[in-house]
Image (cartoon, rainbow, N blue to C red):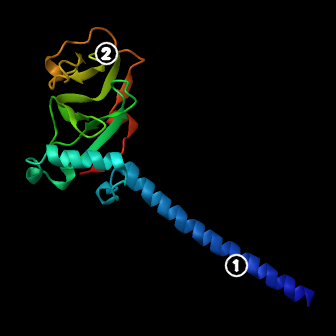
């Protein structure tokens, strides 16, 4: 009787190990497929569910207002944005940098972008901007100065009468090396930032 029980336990143990191996192979196949699509750039991110986040929803709503006239001409692929929060005026409330990386918003001189207040109101619209944007250690009118690359040169962007100039390429050229202590925002390429639909 003992030998029959031991044989039965042995068979059950062997069978359970075989099922785990099959399960492990299925998981391994799914992981490999997902990784190959992600690395190969064939993963379809447009079907990803939108993130349920108050900031994302605030920006999404504001973009639909700001771009109301553009929306009919835009494709589904054009309707994505990146954002990053940064407190530009040390009021303990973040402002939002909003950027794009598709042909509707980008051309040979750079891309368009926005800076929004914490409540979603518009501070600025930028054109011909290359990302990332650097936050300078200096400030003007209680807002951090920005260092923006445009036309292969860095430009110093200073607040004037409550607004930053919208075209960085015609602003003062930054002389010297960009400061290492400057924070970077909208580092879309290097940081692999998440994109959101609107």
Residue 101 picture quarter: top left
Looking at the rendering, in which quadrant would you find the N terminus? bottom right
Q: Nearer the viewer, residue 54 or 31?
A: 54
Q: Nearer the viewer, residue 114 or 49?
A: 114
Residue at the image point whose x is 31% and y is 15% from the top: 139
Residue at the image point whose x is 26% and y is 40% from the top: 120
Which mark identifies residue 139?
2
Q: Is 72 left, or right, of 55 in this rendering?
A: left
Q: Secondary structure at mark 1?
A: helix
Location of residue 181 in the rendering, given as x and y in whole percent from the top left corner:
42, 18
Q: Is 21 left, or right, of 198 in this rendering?
A: right
Residue 183 picture quarter: top left
In the displayed structure, 35 sits above or below 157; it is: below
Location of residue 58 in the rendering, given as x and y in whole percent from the top left corner:
28, 47
Which mark identifies residue 7?
none
Q: Secondary structure at mark 2?
A: strand
Mark 1 = which residue? Answer: 15
Q: Badge 2, how many Cα within 10 Å: few under 14, some, many 20+? A: some
Residue at the image point whose x is 34% and y is 58% from the top: 48
Query: What is the distance, in whole Å, between disc 2 and disc 1 at their CAs?
Result: 69 Å
């Amino acid at each position: 009787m003992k030998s029959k029980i031991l044989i039965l336990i042995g068979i059950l143990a062997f069978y359970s190990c075989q099922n785990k191996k099959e399960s492990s192979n299925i998981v391994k196949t799914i992981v490999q497929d997902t990784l190959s699509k992600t690395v190969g750039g064939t993963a379809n991110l447009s079907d990803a569910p939108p993130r349920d986040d108050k900031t994302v929803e605030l920006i999404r709503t504001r973009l639909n207002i700001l771009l109301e006239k553009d929306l009919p001409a835009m494709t589904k692929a054009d309707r994505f944005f990146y954002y990053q929060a940064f407190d530009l005026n040390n009021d303990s409330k973040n402002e939002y940098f909003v950027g794009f990386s598709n042909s509707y918003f980008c051309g040979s001189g750079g891309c368009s972008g926005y800076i929004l207040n914490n409540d979603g109101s518009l501070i600025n619209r930028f054109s011909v901007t290359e990302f990332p944007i650097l936050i300078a250690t200096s400030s003007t009118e209680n807002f951090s100065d920005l260092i923006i690359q445009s036309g292969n040169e860095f430009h110093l962007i200073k607040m004037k009468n409550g607004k930053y100039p919208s075209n960085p390429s015609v602003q003062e050229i930054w002389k010297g090396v960009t400061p290492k202590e400057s924070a970077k925002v909208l580092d879309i390429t290097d940081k692999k930032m998440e994109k959101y639909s609107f």
